[in-house]
Amino acid sequence: MHDAANTSRLDALLAGLKASGHRLTPQRVAIVRELVSRADHPSVEQLHAAILPDYPTTSLATVYKTIHLLKERGEVLELGFGELGSRYDGRRPEPHPHLICTACGGITDPDEGGEGLSEMVRQLAAQSGFDVKAHRFDLFGLCARCRDKG
Amino acid sequence: MHDAANTSRLDALLAGLKASGHRLTPQRVAIVRELVSRADHPSVEQLHAAILPDYPTTSLATVYKTIHLLKERGEVLELGFGELGSRYDGRRPEPHPHLICTACGGITDPDEGGEGLSEMVRQLAAQSGFDVKAHRFDLFGLCARCRDKG
DNA sequence: CTAGATGCAAACACTTTGCACCCTG
DNA sequence: CAGGGTGCAAAGTGTTTGCATCTAG
């Protein structure tokens, strides 16, 4: 996931918004750019903080509204955690496993190892009679860095 | 999961509480009994409503406190959903897959089909360097009943 | 008796909403 | 220059907490 890919994804998102009659305000562009540029699944709070220096008037409500808009369009994956609030993945909106470090709060996408996931989803759907539309697979623990420290 | 099994689990939970210096108040017993007796992963609100007829003075706060106590002791599995609040599994505190119907709100445990899960967890842990302590695997969709209706 | 539990209400954290003003297209 | 967007503050959730009162053991 390098700069070129992020840029094209950014452009695609912005083009899509414009195409469906939405305006590209500076705040909105900044939020989307920030969201797409990071791999760390930021919270609304973190996005807001990151944008504030460059767009000091941006309100938290606007960040929430923008995220909500992208969610509706299926362009962000929301990872809601009861206590810790929600975190957002603007790069890979399809469901995929997440590794959540309970020490540093970092969330990362595994490089590989989730191959059998869709097969398992298929199996569970078949035996339960469920029509499965989405799924979520989270692993909680200590990331390599925090494990070594602790 | 029949009555006898639930009764013994209930007894075990109550005995454990008493053994660690907690009192078995009528409210507390009622909450634990209700939690253990249902397979539908009730919310705090639902537990409270179920108990109210028999123990009319029970407050929501007490239900929250009791659930919290059981959580600390590792005797309930909490399934937190950002918007919809949390649901609790008092029967199987270890992580296992859940099927969540987005139409009726029902949550069920699959009878089988989750066999490969721990292996996948192991794989993801190995390749990422994570020390995985817990995991969560949720499938969202329509249960058989709601699928047929809709 | 006396710690621990209850119940109420106030406090909380995160998110949503209403509305007057603003600015993109 | 019109309609969508913004920012503020107020309202909503679900959950937690402080504290006086009550009660199980």
Image (tube, coloured by chain):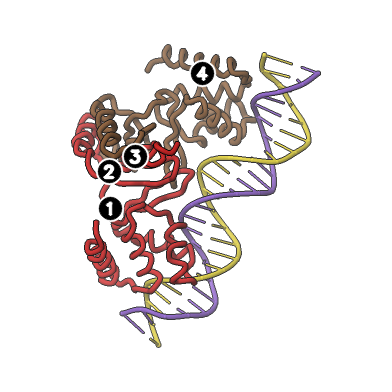
Chain colours: A red, B brown, C purple, D yellow
Q: Which mark is residue A93?
A: 1
Identified by mark 1, the residue type is: Pro
Q: Is residue B148 left or right of residue A50?
A: left
Q: Which residue is mark 3?
A: A138
Q: Quadrant of the N terminus of chain A?
A: bottom left
Residue at point 57%, 21% (across, down): B29
Circle 4 residues within 10 Å: few <14, some 14–19, many ≥20: many
Q: Nearer the viewer, mark 1 or mark 4?
A: 1
Q: Which mark is residue A110?
A: 2
Same chain for mark 1 and mark 4? The answer is no
Q: Nearer the viewer, mark 2 or mark 1?
A: 2
Q: Which mark is residue B136?
A: none
Location of residue B147 with respect to A93 vertically, above or below: above
Q: Secondary structure at mark 2?
A: loop
Residue A13 percent across, percent down from the top left: 27, 65
Label 3 vs 2, first from the N-terminus: 2
Q: Which residue is mark 4?
A: B13
Identified by mark 4, the residue type is: Leu
Q: Secondary structure at mark 3?
A: strand
Q: Quadrant of the C terminus of chain A?
A: top left
Residue B33 percent across, percent down from the top left: 51, 21
